Amino acid sequence: MDFFNWNLMFEPTISSLRIVGLWPKYDSYKIDAYSVYAVISVSFFMYANTFFQGINIFIVEMDIQALAATIFVAEHIVAVLKISGLLQNLKKIKNLMKQLNRETFQPKSSTQLRMVEQYLQMWKMFYLIYQCGVLALGIFWLTKPILDKSYKSYELPFFAWYPVDVKTSPFYQIVYLYQCVALFYIALAHMQLDLLSTGLMVYIGIQCDILCDSLTHVTCLSELMECIKHHKKILRFSTDFNAFLGNIIVAQFATSVATIALGLFKLSLAVPGSAEFYTLVSFALTTTLELFLYCWVGNEVEIKSSKVPIAAWNSRWIGKSIRMQKTVLFFLMRTQKELTINAYNLFPLSLRTFMGIMRSSWSYFAVLRQMNSPQA
């Protein structure tokens, strides 16, 4: 079999992270020009932008509708927490990327190669849909003041406090441009981090498929032992990945219920057909798609890993040596528990978790509607 370069799967994502200053050449940042660029860009476009939006919450008078407007701030805070998690665990994720092209993880037949290519094609489809959703959301968000003519009253895309009077020129135009650049910076970094995380989960799922195919074609003890080594390395890779993913998933899921509920509530107040309406529809769809992407690929890992003992049972072990038969039975016992991707063992990434979050979000949305009704 020819060498299959798994790094090509992540090349666009890594290039994008490098552009925004989140992927240094080495395992950590050194004292060089790239590190200076990273500090300036992350501080100016991510931390400062989120700070200006966050401090506005404590300045304005809050009611339930004003609270709903904080969904955008919450989404930016989630991005900050997730990106901070990447920076904190940069060495771990770099180590995972170095393991992708291990000989053990290579497709071992033309059948396995076709299987990998077909699954990657499906992944690329989700990849493009998610990117298009984020791009559409960014465009709607930033052009909303122009589309609904609110720019005439000096309204910005995001509610935020600044140490200058943004109701006058040229401060309004400068701050508007700053918010545009900051949004695209955060969106690009946030989106590529999501695609890196989910892409690695796709990789784990594909490795389970390769292992299952190898197990069904086992004919001798040495081949079986190679499959067992492959399984151990998959488990090790998954454990290391869970250690990296923990902070990211906790940040994402801890705010998902509130973000989706507040987004639906604000959407229910928007005038159908208005710029705000389309912006909120785009926000709700993109946020839900982001959550679904994590849960779907996590669910795929669980399903694919559950097929490993079945594949081992269907291998050609009957009639073989006693040692091989015992090895198969021990392996069957070891693989009874499926592989799960989770955050600190709090909850697994699965479609069950996704449905639970959506049900909770709808319940909180109903409560907000009731609180805002005239009879309340």
Image: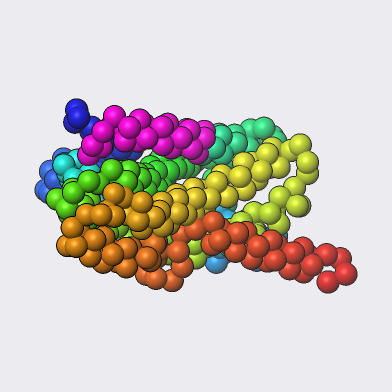
Which quarter shows the C terminus? Answer: bottom right
User: In the image, residue 87 lies at what x, y percent?
Assistant: 27, 55
Which quarter shows the N terminus? Answer: top left
Asked if residue 362 is positioned above or below residue 186 in the image, the reply reads: below
Asked if residue 71 is positioned above or below residue 133 in the image, the reply reads: below
Q: As rendered, which of 10 and 103 lies closer to the eye? A: 103
Q: Residue at x 39, y 70 (%)?
A: 345
Q: As rendered, which of 294 and 47 lies closer to the eye? A: 294
Relative to 189, is 133 on the left or the right?
Answer: right
User: Looking at the magenta stretch, what is its main secondary structure?
Assistant: helix
Quarter of the rendering containing residue 356: bottom right
Furthest-front residue in this view: 319
Q: Residue at x 32, y 46 (%)?
A: 216
Quarter of the rendering containing residue 274: top right
User: In the image, residue 332 lies at what x, y percent?
Assistant: 32, 63
User: In the image, residue 84 lies at what x, y percent?
Assistant: 33, 57
Q: Residue at x 37, y 69 (%)?
A: 344
Q: Residue at x 41, y 36 (%)?
A: 119
Relative to 68, is 318 on the left or the right?
Answer: left
Q: Is residue 143 visible?
A: yes
The magenta-colored residue range is 106-132
Number of disc labels: 0
User: In the image, residue 213 lies at what x, y percent?
Assistant: 32, 43
By what rule are the colours in the image chosen?
Answer: rainbow
Q: Is residue 204 visible?
A: no
Q: As rendered, which of 26 and 178 lies closer to the eye? A: 26
Residue 258 counted in the magenta span: no
Quarter of the rendering containing residue 184: top left
